[in-house]
Amino acid sequence: MKEKELSHFNKNGRAHMVDVGGKEDTQRIAIAEGSVVMQPETLKMIKDRKIAKGDVLAVAQVAGIMAAKKTSQIIPLCHPLILTNVDLNFTINENENKIIIQSKVKTMGKTGVEMEALTAVAAAGLTIYDMCKAVDRGMTIKSIYLLEKSGGKSGYFSRPLKRGSEYTDK
């Protein structure tokens, strides 16, 4: 098996932004997921909108969308993209005292939106933590990963596990 070359390095071994100018525009979609685990009381306060800073999930939704749009400004070699859609979905899992965060990002372009989807989940998780830290500093942001992506030369990728969420149900 031939070892795959890393495209973000030039012939001198230095980082560079990959030239995507010759690639075709295709519909690109990426779905990412992560979670925030917390005390049961914190989860109840979020559900009941009793957190002093406001509606945690509404603010986390906006933070995730904003972060997806700004990904190229915080991840050094990402291309700035015109995103055609960014959405976040929150699932409250009371049995495990966690909020599962999923993002779905779309574009029509020359490069994928995996980093934008992952960044959206990370920012939403960080926002949940920030808004709730006064009542629960022991929260944990866990397992941020790509669930699936489509479009482009590499085609379709799907992580073997399925959570049965809004975005991954077929």
Image (cartoon, rainbow, N blue to C red):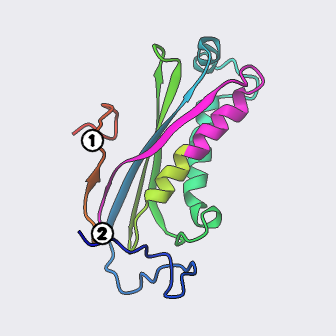
Q: Position of residue 133 (x, y in %)?
A: 74, 27
Specify few, some or many for label 2: CA neighbours under 10 Å numbering under 14, 14-19, or 20 or more.
some
Front-lying residue, 51 or 155? 155
Report which quarter residue 151 is drawn in. Answer: bottom left
Q: Quarter holding the N terminus?
A: bottom left
Front-lying residue, 160 or 112? 160
Q: Earlier in the sequence, mark 2 or mark 1?
A: 2
Total number of numbered discs in the rendering: 2
SS of the residue under disc 2: loop
Query: Which of the labelled discs sits on residue 152, or is there none?
Result: 2
Distance between mark 2 and mark 1 Cα atoms: 20 Å
Q: What are the residue bounds of the magenta stretch? A: 122-151
Q: Quarter holding the C terminus?
A: top left
Specify few, some or many for label 1: CA neighbours under 10 Å numbering under 14, 14-19, or 20 or more.
few
Image check: 80 left or right of 127? left
Image point 50% across, 84% down: which residue?
Answer: 10
Report which quarter residue 125 is drawn in. Answer: top right
Based on the picture, tell me whether residue 132 belongs to the magenta stretch.
yes
Image check: 50 left or right of 34? right
Image point 64% across, 17% down: which residue?
Answer: 42
Q: Check disc 2 and give the amino acid type.
A: Gly
Q: Check disc 1 and give the amino acid type.
A: Pro
Based on the picture, tell me whether residue 167 belongs to the magenta stretch.
no
Q: Dots 2 and 1: beta carbons under 8 Å?
A: no
SS of the residue under disc 1: loop
Query: Which of the labelled discs sits on residue 160, or is there none?
Result: 1
